[in-house]
Amino acid sequence: MIQAQEFVEAARNLGFGWYTGVPCSFLTPFINYVINDVQLKYISAANEGDAVAIAAGAAIAGKPAVVMMQNSGLGNAVNPLTSLTYIFRIPMLLICTLRGERHLQDEPQHQLMGQITDKLLQTMTIPWEFFPTEAAEIEPVLQRATAYMQQERHPYALIMRKGTIAPHALTRSSIPERENSASAHIQQSFFRDNKEQRISRSEALAGIVELTDPENTVVIATTGYMGRELFASKDSANHLYMVGSMGCASSMGLGLSLARPDLKVVVIDGDGAALMRMGNFATIGTYGGANLTHILLDNEVHDSTGAQATVSAGISFAKIAEACGYGVTLDGDDPALLDALFTADANTRPKFAHLKIRPGTLENLPRPNLTPEAVLQRFMKHIGNS
């Protein structure tokens, strides 16, 4: 058994100051120590997949990050671990608890995952070893992990067994306090109530590009036609085209915006992607700052897979964003909404716009002519993290 301080301080010496994840009782002393230290950053994610994406955003900004989760939650993280961190080659340290270990009396829901945790990591080509249980083991473990991550630019995992870390009391709230800003909140609607007048995705993207300054603003487009049409509209070093990890663009944007408060971060979501990971609205509303702008282009269908309908026609995303703590929430089908969004003052909170658009895409829509890894390296160089 080790003290939480022993591991966290050794990790801090190697640059790890950002932590995110979903709690497990095995991790409690570890998480408590991180939360108690005001020099460390802890972000409580809605699910483990979003935690991976948040850490990816921090890593892109040059902040080595640790993702903490229960092994049952590893299932929630499979998609971003295989289609985000693997494809883009984004390193992070994973700490995954071993619930349901053989001979450990545990809850029945952990039985299968306890048997396959190591195999699941191996299948995802994530090297792993057991979390250190002796102080003398900490430095060598971290050296192996960091050496691998620096060379391969992929995640490295530590599997934590029960009773590995001694108890550590929580003395500080992990959730940032926000002033009651109901009076300062900006909410506007820009509806023309005519579906035939709705603009296309490409027209909306062209408008967003025109309103953003590439010198101090980055744009992250969600997977599917969104990223491809942004590329077709204007390929730029300040653009990042998600090719997978559906729904994770907003959480990655959150991590990047927190790690680089000097940057303006614009996330362009789709209705299907936003519906898939709605829990991140609450995380963004809690932790996000005014440098994060979240735009949802809603055509009410899964366009890239055959235009099957989503359930977004009856959803008020702006009201959801407002309830979750965004500072500015706009909705409508008038493109004037975008001008209002970029000129609005959110004070210290993130901004959100829900713009209705029409379905359909460009003929002969191209795909980015750069690999995801090359796109990311160009993006990182643009923001000064080479």
Image (cartoon, rainbow, N blue to C red):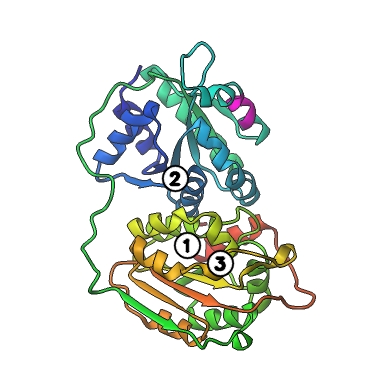
Q: Nearer the viewer's eye, disc 2 or disc 3? A: 3
* Mark 2 → mark 3, Cα distance in angstroms: 36 Å
The residues colored magenta run 116-120
Query: Which is more toward the observer, 265 or 149?
Result: 265
Q: Position of residue 103 (x, y in %)?
A: 51, 10
Three-letter amino acid code at the position of disc 1 = Gly
- Dominant SS in magenta: helix
The circle drawn on residue 384 is 1
Q: Nearer the viewer's eye, disc 1 or disc 2? A: 2
Q: Earlier in the sequence, mark 1 or mark 3?
A: 3
Contact, mark 1 vs mark 2 (Cβ under 8 Å): no
Residue at mark 2: 64
* Mark 1 → mark 2, Cα distance in angstroms: 15 Å
The circle drawn on residue 7 is none
> Would you say residue 247 sits in the magenta stretch?
no
Image quadrant where one finds the N terminus: top left
SS type, badge 3: helix
Residue at mark 3: 312
Contact, mark 2 vs mark 3 (Cβ under 8 Å): no
* Residue 368 visible to the viewer: no
Q: Earlier in the sequence, mark 1 or mark 2?
A: 2
Question: What residue do we see at 50% from left, 42% from top?
Answer: 92
Q: Position of residue 305 (x, y in %)?
A: 73, 62
Three-letter amino acid code at the position of disc 2 = Pro
- Crowding around mark 2 (Cα neighbors within 10 Å: few <14, some 14 to 19, many 20+) is many
* Residue 307 visible to the viewer: yes
Q: Nearer the viewer's eye, disc 1 or disc 3? A: 3
> Eyeballing the image, is 152 above or below 24?
below
